[in-house]
Amino acid sequence: MTMQSPSPVLARRNDGAVAILTLSRPQSRNTLSEALLAALTAELLAIGDDKNVRAVILNAEGPVFCAGHDMKEMTARRADADRGRAYFADILGQCARMMQLMVSLPQPVIAAVEGVATAAGCQLAASCDLAVAGAEARFCTPGVHIGLFCSTPMVALSRNLSNKHAMEMLLLGDMADAATAHRFGLVNRVTAAGGTTAEAMAMARIIAGKSPLTVKTGKQAFYRQREMALEEAYIYASRVMVENMLARDAEEGIGAFIGKRDPVWEGR
């Protein structure tokens, strides 16, 4: 296990081929401050270029996974001449870019959620490729209660949940427990409280044992085809599969399957 240079708001450690990012603002409920958004963006960019990392786990210190945007930082900018308009646009743009970066990352990202994930914190979990929730985890998009509809969290929710389930969370603003989040499709698995990182690590190690080229190709294709019409999606997916079939790792994997041996991945 290797440690990286610590950030005041985000910790990173590597466990073999798995990078573990830990939100480290427990005193501020791990809200997505300017500093935390910048740190997450920087680490994700570094991980994307690191061929030694095959999967990523995102977890948090303290009893709250992430309580969304830092409302104290945002409210302070209402004193600006434009009442904060430019700042709000900038910070929401930074957040959107970071969320999209997780989706475009070559490596799968697994959220390990203990405690509460609200607003942009719920968006953060939904933007990960996979998610594990502790039995006491709670999820919520409560903006409607304070006159601020969770429009940006809505983007991630609407791409993970059915329309009715997404609208239920957005319009009612109620807390969804871990079992409800699992039923809605927001999380993949529910573990005993405190067990999410171990479960996420088990999933990450399985992923890390696969061809990195295949995982990268599949993740990219999944998100691209989802936005296409059916016929276009099949044409695109067929083209991707042809290229994948011609890759060295596919040749090796199929040969290993036929020969009843373990494959040796080269990532090409």
Image (cartoon, rainbow, N blue to C red):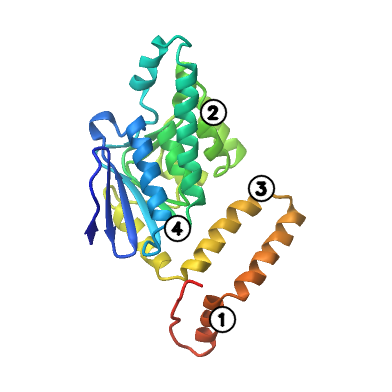
Secondary element type, mark 2:
helix
Amino acid at pointer 4:
Gln
According to the picture, the residue beneath numbered tag 2 turns out to be 151
What distance separates the C-alpha of mark 3 from that of mark 4?
20 Å
According to the picture, the residue beneath numbered tag 3 turns out to be 227
Q: Position of residue 148 (x, y in %)?
A: 49, 20
Which labelled disc corresponds to residue 206?
Answer: none
Q: Is residue 266 above or below residue 62?
A: below
Amino acid at pointer 3:
Glu
Please identify the quarter of the rendering in which residue 67 is found. Answer: top left
Quarter holding the N terminus? bottom left
Q: Earlier in the sequence, mark 3 or mark 4?
A: 4
What distance separates the C-alpha of mark 1 from that of mark 4?
22 Å
According to the picture, the residue beneath numbered tag 1 turns out to be 251
Name which residue lies at 35% across and 56% down: 200
Q: Is residue 240 above or below residue 167?
A: below
Cβ–Cβ under 8 Å for marks 3 and 4 = no
**47 left or right of 28 in image:** right
Whether residue 96 is visible to the viewer of this picture, yes or no, is yes
Whether residue 31 is visible to the viewer of this picture, yes or no, is no
Between tags 2 and 4, which lies in front?
Answer: 4
Q: Is residue 46 above or below residue 70?
A: below
What distance separates the C-alpha of mark 2 from that of mark 1?
45 Å
Secondary element type, mark 3:
loop
What distance separates the C-alpha of mark 1 from that of mark 3?
30 Å
According to the picture, the residue beneath numbered tag 4 turns out to be 107
Q: Position of residue 249 (x, y in %)?
A: 52, 76
